[in-house]
Image (cartoon, grey):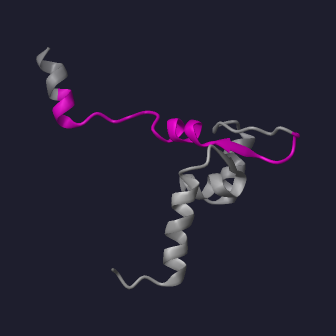
Amino acid sequence: MQNLSIEDRLGKIESMLLSQKRVLTFEEGCRFIGISESYCYKLTSLRMIPHSKPEGKKIYFDRELLEFWLLRNPIKTTSQLKLEVKK
């Protein structure tokens, strides 16, 4: 086993737990997609990222919608483009 610090091991455990939750808090959502809280506030205020505000104040995220948002606008590989040209 690798010599990981306790903090590193806890970070890995937290990541695993986040992947099991469907509804994420604002802080969890930021960690999940890997952006700062200030940038995430900007994205939510501009309505550029899917989120919910059930009581009008606290922000929550649906993990599946965040995954879909992260995978939007896929870039085709060179081999995929070559296959399209041949058709």
In the current view of this chain or complex, which residue is farthest to the top? 87
Residue shown at 70% from the left, 48% from the top? 42
Residue shown at 49% from the left, 68% from the top? 12
Depicted 60 relative to depicted 28: above or below: above
In the current view of this chain or complex, which residue is farthest to the left? 86
Residue shown at 14% from the left, 14% from the top? 87
Q: Name the foreground residue: 1 vs 23.
A: 1
Q: Name the foreground residue: 6 vs 51.
A: 6
Q: Is residue 23 left or right of residue 8?
A: right
How many marks do you count on the picture?
0
Image-quadrant location for residue 62: top right
Q: Is residue 22 left or right of residue 53?
A: left
Q: Is residue 51 left or right of residue 12?
A: right
The image quadrant where one finds the N terminus is bottom left
Residue shown at 71% from the left, 52% from the top? 26
Image-quadrant location for residue 2: bottom left
Magenta-tinted stretch = 55-81
Residue 10 is situated, as x and y percent measured from the top left of the image, at 55, 73
Residue 80 is situated, as x and y percent measured from the top left of the image, at 20, 30
Depicted 26 relative to depicted 4: above or below: above
Depicted 78 relative to depicted 19: above or below: above
Does the magenta-highlighted stretch encompass residue 23?
Answer: no
Depicted 27 relative to depicted 66: above or below: below
